[in-house]
Amino acid sequence: MECSCGGIVFGGDCVQVVGCVICLINGGKQLIIYRLIRPKFMIYITQLIFVKEGQEAAFHEFEQHAIPLMEKYNGKVLYRLRPSGEDFIDLEEEPPYEIHFISFDAEGDLQAFLKDDSRLKFVHLKDKSVKSILLVKGEKMS
């Protein structure tokens, strides 16, 4: 139901979204009830990383620069695994060198991280050391 001021009537009161602030107008008094920082559409990424034999040191050097930089862009490594052969129950193909499970607050944060100039200075180490990456993007399910 729409209010005469253009807001929406919610629970008998008028609720308006003004920029990034939600205002509650109750009996002619305007109260700010919630400030929206940004919508949360968390992105989750799983990477199975296959490293070229003999290039592990170059890969580790790239990670030393890239992983701490993620925080600047609202990203973090939730899990980082380096499995051995006996860690797999079934294995039909080559095992990955590492498995990363990471998150970013939003797609824009991920894209900004990927374009960061300081990351790009070291991306040659990734290119030199990584044979392939199987990347899966998803969202959290309750």
Image (tube, grey):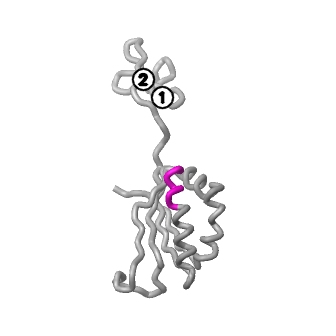
Residue nearer the viewer, 39 or 118: 118
Residue nearer the viewer, 65 or 10: 65
Q: CA distance from mark 2 to mark 1?
A: 7 Å
Magenta span: chief secondary structure: helix
Say the numbered circle drawn on residue 8: none
Tell me the amino acid under the disc marked 1.
Val
Q: Position of residue 98 (x, y in %)?
A: 46, 74
Residue extending farthest bottom: 92
Q: Verify CB contact (< 8 Å) between mark 2 and mark 1.
A: yes
SS label for mark 1: strand
Q: How many marks?
A: 2
- Figure quadrant of residue 11: top left
**Residue indicated by mark 2:** 32
Q: Position of residue 36 (x, y in %)?
A: 46, 34
Residue nearer the viewer, 119 or 43: 119
Say the numbered circle drawn on residue 21: 1
Residue name at image x 47 percent, y 86 percent: 93
